Image (tube, grey):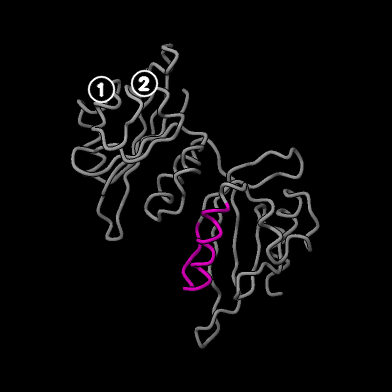
Amino acid sequence: MPYRHAYENIPAQVWTASPDGMLNYVNPEAAAFMGLPEEELHGSGWGDAVHPQDIVAAAPRWSLSIATGERYEQLFRLRSGIDQRYHWFISRANAVRDEDGCITHWVGVNTRIDGIALAHEVGRVAFAANSVSHGVFDQLPVAMIVLGGAGLRVQRTTAAARRFAAMEMVDQQPLLVAYPQLASLCESGELTEVMMLGEGRRFSDLLLSVAEGKPMAFDVMCEPLHDAHGTVEGLTLAFLPA
């Protein structure tokens, strides 16, 4: 296999697949993480390590890439063979083509993400590509709010973000109605600036009362959401304990 030696020395999970999407190689990093011999991960065997709730979105997205040749990019959880816990990864794969433009194989990399990196990738990938199902998004271990439309209305929230909402049903509510505690961010005009400039910002030590009523300090990551033409169409707010 071309570049196999290089793949085996990359400190990330590297894999290749045939044109029909069946895995035919995983590097030692991937096999060690999943605690399985490489051969057991060939074909569709890798799917057993994906969280059952995440495979619902991951499998159709992979099938779409196989059918169209489009770049594959997907968030999902993989089970570790060491501690049997699920950890978040972003998987990316590109088709390799011959001189006639036919796909000869796929090369992919799974990169583990958590904390701030997870929040950033969710904001960048999940919504623009619509590649994360509502069920999976709801369980992300980050308090996150997705805003869009006129007046920056709430489009989606994780379960963690609903802990400090002012009401039970927040979908399509204006941000300040659903989250009046964020008045300082809105009134300062900084969210508007993120929309206008298209550049993310981080706000430190914002005090919010969670469901139990005890104030907690959060750092808030605000990232713009771009459409296919590069126009900012919304924002994500990710709340990370300070």
The percent position of residue 27, horizontal first and vertical second, equals 72, 60
Outermost residue toward the top in this view: 214
Near mark 1 (Cα within 10 A), the count class, few <14, some 14-19 or many ≥20, is few
Residue lying at 27% horizontally and 60% vertically, measured from the top left? 229
Name the image quarter holding the N terminus.
Answer: bottom right
Of the numbered discs 1 and 2, the one sitting upstream in the chain is 1
Amino acid type at circle 2 is Leu
> Residue at the right extreme?
37
Residue 40, percent from left and from top: 78, 60
In the image, residue 36 sits, relative to residue 22, either above or below, namely above
Viewer-nearest residue: 109 or 177: 177
Residue 8 image offset from top left, x and y in percent: 72, 61
Which residue: 50% across, 58% down? 73
Query: Over which residues does the magenta segment extend?
Result: 55-73
Q: Quadrant of residue 203 in the image?
A: top left
To which quarter of the image does residue 97 belong? bottom right
Q: Which residue is mark 1?
A: 184
For the stretch drawn in magenta, the main secondary structure is helix
Q: Secondary structure at mark 2?
A: strand
Who's the residue at 40% across and 44% down the image? 123
Instruction: Tell whether label 2 touches label 1 (CB within 8 Å).
Output: yes
Residue in the picture at 61% in, 70% down: 21
Q: Is residue 3 magenta?
A: no
Considering the numbered disc 1 on the image, is that residue within a helix, a strand or a loop?
helix
Where is residue 217? Give x, y as percent: 42, 18
Q: Amino acid at mark 1?
A: Ser
Q: Which residue is mark 2?
A: 206
| Residue 3 image-quadrant placement | bottom right
Inspect the magenta stretch and tell me whether residue 65 lies in it. Answer: yes
Residue 159 vs 216, above or below: the answer is below
Residues packed near mark 2 inside 10 Å, few (<14), some (14 to 19) or many (20 plus): some
